[in-house]
Image (cartoon, grey):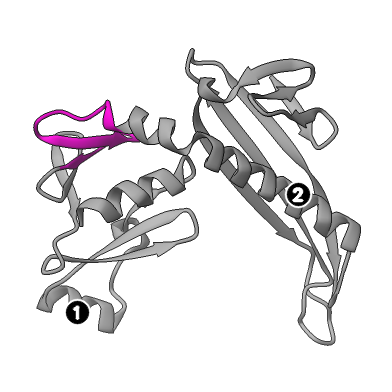
């Protein structure tokens, strides 16, 4: 199902309505927020982009496997001046996603913890977060939260792992590192929950 925020959306105490369809909050399993920005050609005199188009979308996965795509009306930004009406629409859309995240936080935490075993803390997007603070992907150790092995940085919707060591330091200094060598995990879905779970065990 695809709907537009705020036109097709209404919020109630025990449920949210998308295009006339009621969804109980406890039926929401996962939430993703996407933000996309496009820029026109740079101006000839200043080299500054003349305008950009920023749009966002929210994807909601339900317990039974269905999903709802919620588009948020885009706005345009002209030079240093901002389209106030468009800005408000975007802010409302992000506030709406945060509202859903807060309303469903505990149940989403439990959904991830249910994927764990004696060895695995939780699973996320094919990655197995092990209780010994390592991360496994495809039956191989992918990264680790051990500060002696990796430095970990949180960026926008992403966790990046940089391997420590003399050789890696030299490679970084001479900029020999290939882009494909970067170790990262995208956090498009449930970033709030994943960071909460990670911070509890590192």
Residue 182 is situated, as x and y percent measured from the top left of the image, at: 32, 59
N-term-proximal mark, 1 vs 2:
2
Q: Identify whether 180 is placed above or below 190.
A: below
Between 100 and 12, the residue placed more toward the observer is: 12
- Picture quadrant of residue 43: bottom right
Question: Which residue, given by chain and number where applicable, does mark 2 sit on?
Answer: 92
- Residue 118 is inside the magenta segment: yes
The numbered mark at residue 156 is none
The numbered mark at residue 169 is 1
Which span of residues is magenta-colored?
A: 113-130
Q: Quick check: 187 left or right of 53?
A: left
- Residue found at x 68% / y 49%: 95
Given the current orientation, which residue lies at the most extreme bottom position? Answer: 45
- Picture quadrant of residue 85: bottom right
The label nearer to you, 1 versus 2, is 2
Q: Quadrant of the C terminus?
A: bottom left
Q: Identify whether 56 is placed above or below 151.
A: above
Residue at disc 2, secondary structure? helix
- Picture quadrant of residue 18: top right
Residue 61 is situated, as x and y percent measured from the top left of the image, at: 53, 25
- Residue found at x 34% / y 31%: 110
How far apart marks 1 and 2 lie (CA) works out to: 44 Å
Q: Quick check: 133 left or right of 21?
A: left
Between 167 and 8, the residue placed more toward the observer is: 8
- Residue 16 is inside the magenta segment: no
- Residue found at x 13% / y 40%: 140
Q: Quadrant of the N terminus?
A: top right
Neighbor class of circle 1 (other Cα within 10 Å; few <14, some 14-19, many 20+) is few
């Amino acid at each position: 199902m695809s709907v537009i925020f705020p036109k097709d959306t209404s919020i109630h105490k025990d449920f949210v309505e998308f295009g006339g369809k009621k969804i109980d909050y406890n039926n929401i399993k996962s939430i993703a927020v996407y933000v996309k920005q496009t820029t026109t050609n740079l101006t000839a005199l200043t080299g500054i982009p003349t305008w950009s188009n920023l749009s966002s979308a929210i994807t909601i996965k339900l317990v039974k496997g269905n999903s709802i795509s919620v588009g948020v009306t885009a706005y345009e930004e002209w030079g240093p001046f901002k389209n106030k009406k468009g800005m408000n629409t975007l802010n409302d859309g992000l506030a709406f996603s945060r509202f859903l995240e807060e309303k469903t936080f505990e149940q989403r935490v439990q959904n991830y913890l249910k994927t764990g075993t004696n060895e695995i803390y939780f699973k996320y997007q094919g990655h197995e977060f092990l209780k010994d603070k390592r991360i496994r992907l495809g039956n191989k150790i992918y990264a680790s939260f051990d500060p002696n092995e990796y430095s970990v940085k949180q960026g926008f919707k992403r966790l990046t792992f940089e391997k420590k060591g003399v050789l890696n330091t030299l490679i970084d200094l001479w900029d020999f590192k290939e882009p494909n060598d970067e170790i990262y995990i995208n956090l498009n879905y449930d970033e709030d929950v994943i960071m909460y779970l990670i911070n509890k065990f590192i």
